[in-house]
Amino acid sequence: MKEKIIINDVGPRDGLQNQEKILTPQERVALIEKLIEAGVRHIEVGAFVSPKAVPAMAGTDLVAAQLPVSDSSGEPFGFSALIPNRKGYDLARAAGINTMGLVIAASNTMNEKNVRMTTEQALAVCEDVLAQAKCDGANVVAYVATAWECPFEGIADEQAVIEITGKLFDYGASEVILADTIGAASPGQVKSLMTKLVAAYGAEKLSCHFHDTRGMGVADVYAAVECGIRKFDASIGGLGGCPFAPGASGNVATEDVVLMLNQMGFDTGIDLLKLSAAADLAAELTGNCDGGHAGRWIKRQIEKAAG
Ligand code: COA
Ligand code: ZN
């Protein structure tokens, strides 16, 4: 039996939030459906954030209303949505989202730019939302953005990241996702931080989110796999970027991560050839998606299979 690794495709959120072309809820649903067809079972479908702050994520409730509950075998999908505060939590719950992804950054300036709160205020919001989630029996995971480097404050302090992660677990987060929001981490830095976090909190409650800004996204995933991490965010076609973090470019592409993990002998449950169709749709809809590094190689396999 191959060991499983869960891929959470964040293309419909991180991938679309900063696009010049704003997609309709229907187009966003079409992209999600293509990911499902490829075997992706965990998808970040949008964000419940201020529509003034991020216009591309308006209408996530309309997206959520059109999502299937489970696949043909009855296996429920893991749909999540990003939330910055209590209002986002309430809206996501009302929209029937199973998992809310609460976001906080490791640095104070990034919190001020992203959610207009200091780190202290953002932590208080996290504590409040997680307490409410406990009462409601709702599943909330937490993102630590700029966990390796902040575009304003530079290299992150590992100890501060470890402490914020610990607080989020104390407040009740079921999982913490360490995010390299601007794609600045190297595999060595990933190994350093993740080794400490795994020792402190256990690999099964941690996940990683990398961007490919400097071409090290897949190498960073590899480093985290070596530390025991078995859950990763990635974005179809390598779409992605944060409007509030200068220099952030696309996420590590789902097709690149899946290809590497398949070749390493892990089971992602994802069909690479069908994933290619999802990447094509992402490119068609946004007009701004080059696809992953492995895209051309995958296309050649499709041509070969077709004879
Ligand atoms: N969803 C929808 N609307 C929200 C909201 C949410 N989660 N939180 C606040 N709002 C609305 C308020 O109702 C208010 O609306 P109004 O102007 O019509 O009265 C408006 O947004 C401003 O509310 P306020 O509480 O003053 O927020 P703010 O202006 O200080 O902004 C955030 C704070 C967190 C709402 C905003 O910065 C945000 O949405 N950030 C998200 C950033 C993001 O998605 N980054 C990329 C991913 S990491
Ligand atoms: Zn991101």
Image: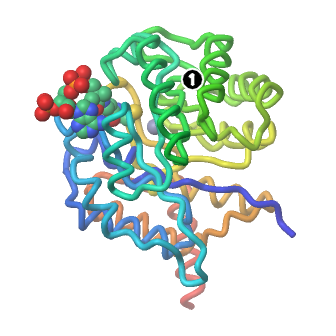
Label 1: element kind: loop
Q: Quadrant of residue 169?
A: top right
Q: Relative to 279, does residue 129 appear above or below in the rendering?
A: above
Query: Seen from this angle, which residue lies furthest left?
Result: 52
Asked if residue 53 can be seen in this view, the reply is no
- Does residue 223 appear left or right of residue 217 in this picture? right
In depth, the one of 243 and 121 nearer the eye is 121
Asked whether residue 170 appears in the rendered view, the answer is yes
Q: Position of residue 4 (x, y in %)?
A: 75, 60
Return the x and y of residue 34 as percentages of the image width and height. 42, 72
Ligand 1 - quadrant of the structure image = top left
Q: Residue at x 48, y 13 (%)?
A: 107
Decide: is 185 above or below 227: above
Residue visible at 73% across and 25% down?
188
Instruction: Give the camera-side residue of 292 and 106.
Output: 106
Work out whether 218 lies above or below 154: below
| Residue identifier under label 1 | 147
Quadrant where the image shows the N terminus: bottom right
**Residue under the image location 53 percent in, 42 percent down:** 140
- Residue 157 image-quadrant placement: top right
Residue drawn 20% across the image and 60% down it: 24
Under mark 1, the amino acid is Ala
Q: Give the mark count.
A: 1
Vertical comparison of 176 with 105: above or below: below
Q: Quadrant of the C terminus?
A: bottom right
